[in-house]
Image: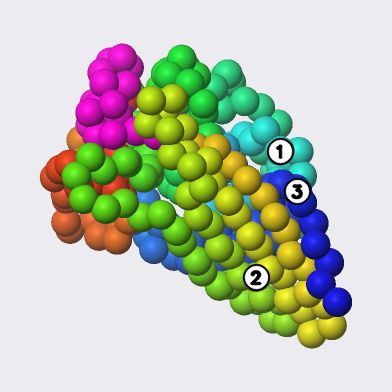
């Protein structure tokens, strides 16, 4: 029998971590390449705003980086801090708003790779977030920001499905665009998560809202934060050897921002 739950995926960090943590290597390697190529200082301390379960933070910690982050969801923060502690690292992730935080000591790099930035519902909060990250970085440090833009020409991606497995646990995810309001700049998404074990099937139904950004709107936002300069543009292939040019059809962009 299927157990059906209407809830927030972020309240189930073990499933979230499996879904989004299974393909960490490409992102991790890309970030290290960015640090080497674009930062004007040696990167030893990294910060992830809205870090969720810390799927990348734990990898950086194991490689000798000093890591920290924040997230609004206490379940995700506990999951992240527990895994850091089990591995012998400090519990360095806090329950904080990614648009309203301060750090005690500045970091050399920050990253937000999978569209979490778009959870910020207003321009004011998005700008506040960028200022917070800039204030948290040393001069010459990087903020690597991955985002799906809304193309103004051609078709856009309206659904995405993927499967992740770990041992006897399998998690299937299907996300689709339920409503797009370009005037209000909101995309309402549906999300269904099927969780399978050898003896059970659980289905989680969730919805979320993302703020929309065309290329022009994103550029206008970044101009409001002069602390950053755009030093490179990549896509979600994470190929450090290949930069992209944003066109009216572009969706996947990784902005490499450097603190002036």
Q: Position of residue 210 (x, y in %)?
A: 49, 37
Instruction: Give the label on residue 73, or none.
Output: 1
Q: Are marks 2 and 3 in contact (CB under 8 Å)?
A: no
Q: Check whether the beta carbons of the residues at disc 2 and disc 1 lie within 8 A of each other.
A: no
Q: Residue visible at 80% across and 62% down?
A: 4
Q: 83 or 164: which is nearer to us?
A: 164
Quadrant that contains the N terminus? bottom right
- What element does badge 2 sit on? strand
For residue 87, which quarter of the picture? bottom right
**Above or below, 7 relative to 184:** below
Which residue is pictured at 31% across the width and 14% down the height?
Answer: 224
Residue appearing at x 21%, y 50% in the figure: 154
Determine crowd level at label 2: few under 14, some 14-19, many 20+ residues with C-alpha closer than 10 A: many
In magenta, the rendered stretch is 211-230
Q: Which structural element holds mark 3?
A: loop
Q: Quadrant of the C terminus?
A: top left
Mark 3 surroundings: few (<14), some (14-19) or many (≥20) residues within 10 A: few
Foreground tag (3 vs 1): 3
Mark 3 or mark 2, which is nearer the start of the sequence? 3
On the image, the x and y values in percent for residue 110 come to: 44, 37
Give yes or no for residue 56 being in the magenta stretch: no
Res. 178 in view: yes
* Residue 215 part of the magenta-drawn span: yes
Q: For marks 2 and 1, give the CA distance.
A: 21 Å
Q: Is residue 206 found left or right of 41 in the rendered image? A: right
On screen, residue 128 above or below 133: above
Q: Badge 3 is on which residue?
A: 7
Q: Which residue is mark 2?
A: 171
Graded by Cα atoms within 10 Å as few (under 14), some (14 to 19) or many (20 or more), the crowding at tag 1 reads some
């Amino acid at each position: 029998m299927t157990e059906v739950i209407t809830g927030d995926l972020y309240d189930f960090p073990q499933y979230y971590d499996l879904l989004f943590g299974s393909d960490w290597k490409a992102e991790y390697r890309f970030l290290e390449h960015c640090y080497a190529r674009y930062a004007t200082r040696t990167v030893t301390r990294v910060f992830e705003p809205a870090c969720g379960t810390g799927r990348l933070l734990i990898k950086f910690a194991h490689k000798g980086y000093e890591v920290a982050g924040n997230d609004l969801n206490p379940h995700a923060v506990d999951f992240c801090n527990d895994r850091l502690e089990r591995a012998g690292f400090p519990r360095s992730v806090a329950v904080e708003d990614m648009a309203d935080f301060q750090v005690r000591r500045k970091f050399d790099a920050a990253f937000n790779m999978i569209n979490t930035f778009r959870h910020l519902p207003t321009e004011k909060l998005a700008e506040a977030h960028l200022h917070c990250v800039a204030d948290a970085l040393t001069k010459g440090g990087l903020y690597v920001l991955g985002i799906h833009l809304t193309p103004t020409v051609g078709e856009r991606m309206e659904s995405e499905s993927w499967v992740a497995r770990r041992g006897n646990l399998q998690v299937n995810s299907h996300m689709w665009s339920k409503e797009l309001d370009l005037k209000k700049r909101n995309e309402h998404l549906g999300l269904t998560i099927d969780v399978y074990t050898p003896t059970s099937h659980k289905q989680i139904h969730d919805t979320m809202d993302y703020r929309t950004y065309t290329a022009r709107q994103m550029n206008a936002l970044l101009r409001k934060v002069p602390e950053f300069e755009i030093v490179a543009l990549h896509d979600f292939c994470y190929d450090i050897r290949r930069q992209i040019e944003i066109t009216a059809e572009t969706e996947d962009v990784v902005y490499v921002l450097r603190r002036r």
